[in-house]
Image: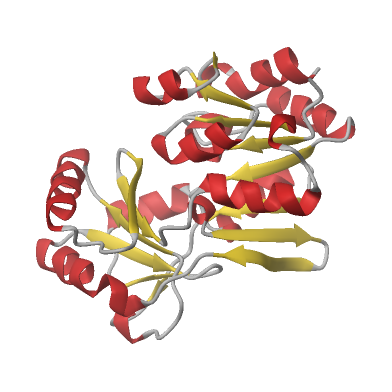
Amino acid sequence: MNYRLIALDVDGTLLNDDHELTEQTIETIQEVHDQGAHIVLCTGRAPDSTLPILQQLGLEGTMITHNGAATVHADERGKSLVNEFSFTLPEIAPMLDYVRREGIHFDVCTSFNMYIERIGEYEKEMYTKFLVSPKLVTDVSELGLPIVKFTLFSNPEMLDRVQQEWDEQQLYGHLRMIRSGDLFIDVMSAKANKGNALKALAATLEIDPSEIMAIGNYYNDLEMMAFAGLGIAVENSPDGVKEAADAVTASNNDEGVHKALVKYCL
């Protein structure tokens, strides 16, 4: 099958656990690109922390960021917003009250910026690892801006409790809550997921789903893997993600993306 679009999750999939790209993976992606395929990074990251990865691959083009909430095109002229699924700050007021009361770290994102109310050394280390420079404000509720993502960062046990309580209380209302990693919970528009963003992009490019390959590692990748003609999970994915995939490749620490591209595209 000649895949015309390759959708790649970044953390835990494209990058190894040291948040690095291997030279072999870069070379393979460039070879697939040179054969005419669109390479699209599909990530929970913001555009500014996704762009360095795209540049390291030696590419420019469209990125699906914020877990599908914002699709951004980047080229020599800069970044431009292609599509976003946003919501308002009053819609997350009950959740903001909860995380402030419980002392859980959080940030809110517009398509291009991230805002926080406090930061400690642990959080600084996390943001540095993900190439993020959040803006510190007194009260995010006063921003008055459309938001694409509200993220909690804490230990797995705390987030397990948050998930259970917010589900029981339906605290997120008509919005969507997803676990985007062991340490992260994201709240977004109900329309926002990587699958919907990939579907919109494919329609613009006139690419059929059967011509798309998607590779991911976590539950926030399921919609894009299901939309693609071939959905692949890396070996380090949870069992539920691997069971939902069409195929499983090697882990992110064993160049799973490179091996999948060699097997199915080259």
The N terminus lies in quadrant? top right
Identify which residue is drawn at 29% across, 64% down: 119
Image x and y of residue 198, in percent: 62, 47
Report the residue at 65% width, 18% height from top. 260
Against 70, residue 9 (above or below) is above
User: Can you say whether 52 is above or below 138 in the image?
Assistant: above
Judge whether residue 136 can be spotted in this image: yes
The quarter of the picture where residue 100 lies is bottom left
Would you place residue 225 above or below residue 102 in this image? above
- Residue drawn at x 42%, y 33% is 218
Residue 90 found in image quarter: bottom left
Left or right placement of residue 182 versus residue 264 in this view: left
Q: Is 134 or 245 nearer to us in this picture?
A: 245
Q: In which quarter of the view is residue 236 placed?
A: top left
Residue 60 in view, yes or no: no
User: x, y percentage for residue 216?
Assistant: 52, 31
